[in-house]
Image (cartoon, rainbow, N blue to C red):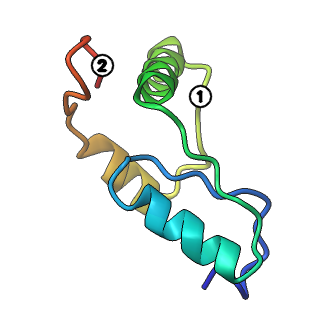
Amino acid sequence: FLKNADVEKVVVDGANGQRILEAEMKEFRLKAPILPTVAEVITANAMWEQAIAQGTLSHNNQPSLTAVTTNCAKRNIGSNGGF
């Protein structure tokens, strides 16, 4: 998929399998993926939630996006209060 896709960046959220994907992308001479740390994921999730609460993040009323975002639940990440 990635070999034929027109993508600018690949970001892998979650440590499980990061290095496997990174190695395969290198083998196929694709751009290296961005592998965020747990702390970076926690910060990004908090910023995302804050933008939704403040009304500064919106979409074009796509029904499928509304369905998946309204059916989300917080999941703890690490032991420092992240989600």
For the residue labelled by badge 2, is the local secondary structure a helix, a strand or a loop? Answer: loop
- Looking at the picture, how far across and down is residue 48, in whole percent? 50, 26
The answer to whether the residues at label 1 and label 2 have Cβ atoms under 8 Å apart is no
- Looking at the picture, how far across and down is residue 41, in whole percent? 46, 30
Above or below, comparing residue 5 to residue 31 in the picture: below
| Residue at which label 1 appears | 57
| Residue at which label 2 appears | 82
Residue 28 as seen in the image, left or right of residue 55: right
Query: Which quarter of the figure has residue 2?
Result: bottom right
Residue at image location 47% in from the left, 14% down from the top: 50
Residue at image location 29% in from the left, 42% down from the top: 70
Residue 39 as seen in the image, left or right of residue 25: left
Q: Say which amino acid is labelled 1.
A: Leu
- Looking at the picture, how far across and down is residue 52, in whole percent? 48, 23
Above or below, comparing residue 67 to residue 64 in the picture: above
Q: Quadrant of the N terminus?
A: bottom right
Residue at image location 28% in from the left, 25% down from the top: 83
Above or below, comparing residue 34 to residue 58 in the picture: below
For the residue labelled by badge 1, is the local secondary structure a helix, a strand or a loop? Answer: loop
Above or below, comparing residue 44 to residue 23 in the picture: above
Residue at image location 51% in from the left, 25% down from the top: 40
Q: Say which amino acid is labelled 2.
A: Gly
Residue 22 as seen in the image, left or right of residue 7: left
Query: Which quarter of the figure has residue 36?
Result: top right
Q: Nearer the viewer, mark 1 or mark 2?
A: 2
CA distance separating discs 1 and 2: 21 Å
Front-most of 38 and 51?
38
Front-most of 22 and 46?
22
